[in-house]
Every structure is written in structure tokens, then in C-alpha cells.
Image (spheres, rainbow, N blue to C red):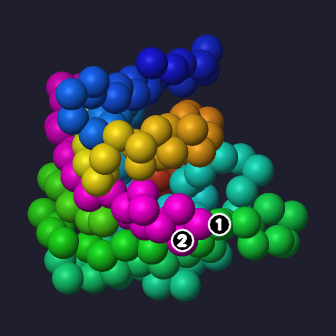
């Protein structure tokens, strides 16, 4: 479990019996905005990953049967390459995709992101990643994923606040 003073808690759990990672995070924004921030490449670019990383999105086709590919850069240098296939998208409710990392080819995961509407215009995001074996999961957890998740979700809070403010002004 992780938390920061300015942002809600992100829970990251590794099941001891099954090679999965489950993450849960609540956002002070309506489900439609949280979902939009996951499927709109211009918004994704603003929040995903650690602060020290920029994203160069080559493909971002978040629809059933779509795909994505992006490169993470730091100070203009390519440091990681990510890709996946989008298996199912239920608008504002769920995304099922694979997640691959070229530098760790055996650590491909099947990820399900579920967007739960909460009272008061809030959203709970649950993400479940299933990997091939415990070794692949250990590599995933050791990769610095927690920092990227925490910093990314904190940036997502800021993006959602801007989107919410823009929606209120419209």
C-alpha cells in the first residue's frame, strides 16, 4: 500500500497463491472523466508513469481489437518500449488489454481495468494484472512500478481536476 500527503492511497497487492497484482485507487472525479483519461492519448501522455519520464506515443487505439505502443524517454533518451493489444473496451466501465515491455519480454500481463462509479461523483479504479509466473511478477514489482503508479496517479488527479474545472465552465 502506498500513499502521499496530497493524494489518495493506492493499494498494490500481490496475491501469494496466484501470479497477479491488484491495484485499487479512488479519484475525486466522475467515472466518465477517469475513463476518458485512460483512452485519450493526449491525456494519457500527461499523467502516465513517473515524473522523470515522458511518453512518445506511436499508436493509441483504445477500442476492442485495438493496440497501443509507446516509448518512455528521459532527457530525450529512449529508456523503455511498451506495447499491447486491446481485447475489450466497455465504454466508461472496463478495459481488457495485454501489457508488454520489450526489455522484459517474459513479463507480459493481461490487465483488466474496471471503473466503478461511487457516490459524490467519485470513481474507484481497480486494475488486475495476471502474469505467466511468479518470477515474471517479481520482475514487474521490482521494476519500480510502484513509483510510476504513485506519481502517475498523482498527475492523473491534477489532469482530472483540470478536466472537471473545464467541464464546470462549459
Distance CA(mark 2)–CA(mark 1) = 7 Å
**Residue under the point 84% across and 72% down:** 76
User: Of label 2 and label 1, which has the lower sequence position?
Assistant: 1
In this picture, residue 150 sits left or right of residue 163: right
Mark 2–mark 1 CB contact (< 8 Å): yes
Q: Percent position (x, y) of residue 9?
A: 45, 20
Q: Secondary structure at mark 2?
A: loop
The label shown at residue 59 is none
Residue 120 on the magenta segment: yes
In x, y percent, where is residue 110?
26, 58
Vertical comparison of 2 with 86: above or below: above
Q: Please name whichever residue, 109 or 60, is drawn nearer the observer in this view of the structure.
A: 109
Q: Residue 5: x percent and y percent?
A: 61, 15
As drawn, is 161 to the left or to the right of 78? Answer: left
Residue 90 screen position, x and y as percent:
13, 63
Name the residue at the right extreme. Answer: 75
Residue at 27% x, 65% y is 97
Question: Dot 1, crowdedness within 10 Å: few (<14), some or many (≥20)?
Answer: some
Q: Quadrant of residue 7?
A: top right
Q: Secondary structure at mark 1?
A: strand
Image quadrant in which you'd find residue 142: top right
Q: Please give the label number shown on residue 80.
A: 1
Residue holding disc 2: 102
Q: Quadrant of the N terminus?
A: top left
Q: Is residue 28 depicted above or below 46 in this figure?
A: above
Q: Which residues are magenta?
A: 99-121
Amino acid at each position: 500500500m502506498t500513499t502521499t500527503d496530497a493524494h489518495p492511497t493506492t493499494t498494490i497487492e500481490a496475491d501469494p497463491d496466484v501470479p497477479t497484482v491488484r491495484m485499487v485507487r479512488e479519484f475525486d472525479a466522475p467515472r466518465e472523466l477517469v475513463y476518458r483519461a485512460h483512452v485519450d492519448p493526449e491525456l494519457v501522455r500527461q499523467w502516465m508513469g513517473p515524473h522523470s519520464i515522458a511518453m512518445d506515443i506511436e499508436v493509441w487505439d483504445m477500442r476492442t481489437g485495438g493496440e497501443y505502443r509507446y516509448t518512455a524517454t528521459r532527457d530525450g533518451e529512449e529508456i523503455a518500449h511498451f506495447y499491447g493489444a486491446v481485447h475489450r473496451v466497455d465504454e466508461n466501465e472496463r478495459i481488457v488489454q495485454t501489457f508488454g515491455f520489450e526489455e522484459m519480454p517474459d513479463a507480459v500481463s493481461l490487465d483488466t481495468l474496471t471503473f466503478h462509479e461511487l457516490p459524490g461523483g467519485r470513481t474507484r479504479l481497480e486494475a488486475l494484472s495476471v502474469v505467466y509466473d511468479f518470477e515474471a511478477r517479481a520482475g514487474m514489482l521490482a521494476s519500480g512500478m510502484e513509483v510510476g503508479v504513485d506519481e502517475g496517479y498523482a498527475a492523473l488527479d491534477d489532469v482530472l481536476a483540470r478536466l472537471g474545472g473545464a467541464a464546470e465552465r462549459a
